[in-house]
Amino acid sequence: MLFPIGDDNSGRKLTPYINYLLVALNVFVFIFFQAAGNDLQFTYAYATVPAEIITGKDFVTLPEMVIDAHTGYQFELPGLQPTPVPVYFTLLTAMFMHGGWAHLAGNMLYLWIFGDNIENRIGHFRYLFFYLLCGVIASLSHVFSTVMLSHNSLVPSLGASGAISGVLGAYLLLFPMRKVHVIFLWFIIAVPALLALGLWIAFQVVSGMGMLGGEETGGVAYAAHIGGFIAGFLLIKFFDPVRSGTSREPVIRRMR
């Protein structure tokens, strides 16, 4: 796999205030509301639970003792907590929460690299609405795939990766030849976004197909990634003033 660490921003004109705000909000919620991932009760209360979205009902379950597969230690996992907001609002709240430092760092790195370009292209408020819309569609993709595949619909899901996947889909459509700096083996190289993001979505699809065969996915909501990516790829044309206008800017002018 290619691990992105940056891209070419030489032609950026707008300061990406919304992208900075989104990164800051995700970090703030994780540290101060989730207690750096240790407040599981808060996390479970505001995460998206597929069964709750389908039924519109707020479920509460008892805590259970589980054994960590890596360490062998036994610990108590809290059950589902009462949701202080209507359950459908968790489609929004869940996209600002994360399961751990690595989960947060990986998502924020991708958002930092790719989000500013989309905001620069479509503007601040269009970008915010686009981001949230992709996140909701991604969460719904996970909800319906979980129910259709008869997986445990009481397992909560959370994270910004669905919304960020929408950003990646938009980036691939708008800037397919933009140079993305990636780590490959022990080297840092520049490759077209078409290659970097094409491989990324291919990995999501292949991994997601494993769900159909009953394989373990390590807690990764691949359906959310795929749904968010497709949403971003298809919807960005309705947000992009260049593509939606009568005169379309030549793609070559955006390759910076």
Image (cartoon, rainbow, N blue to C red):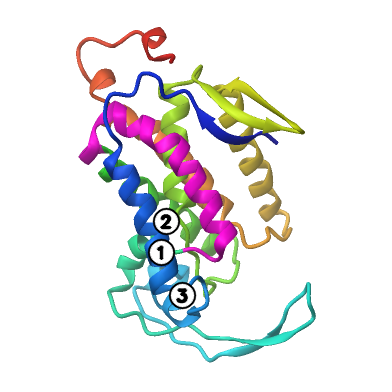
Q: In which quarter of the image is the C terminus?
A: top left
Residue 94: give its label.
1
Please state the extent of the stretch shown in magenta in the rendering.
98-126
Q: Does residue 118 belong to the magenta stretch?
A: yes
* SS majority, magenta: helix
Q: Nearer the viewer, residue 206 or 83?
A: 83
Is 181 placed above or below 152 here?
Answer: above
Characterize the local packing of mark 2: few (<14), some (14-19) or many (20 or more) Cα atoms within 10 angstroms: many
Cα distance between the residues tagged 2 and 3 = 27 Å
Q: Nearer the viewer, residue 29 or 94?
A: 29
Q: Are marks 2 and 3 in contact (CB under 8 Å)?
A: no
| Residue 39 on image: x %, y % | 48, 79
Q: Which residue is drawn at 31% across and 27% down?
A: 237
For disc 3, the marked residue is 35
| Residue 74 on image: x %, y % | 72, 87
Q: Which of 200 and 223 is in front in this view?
A: 200
Is 29 placed above or below 183 here?
Answer: below
Is 167 placed above or below 214 here?
Answer: above
For disc 2, the marked residue is 140
Q: Does residue 73 belong to the magenta stretch?
A: no
Cα distance between the residues tagged 1 and 3 = 15 Å
Cα distance between the residues tagged 1 and 2 = 12 Å
| Mark 2 vs 3, N-terminal side | 3
Q: Which residue is drawn at 47% across and 49% down?
A: 108
Q: Is residue 48 visible?
A: no
Q: Which residue is drawn at 49% across and 63% down?
A: 98
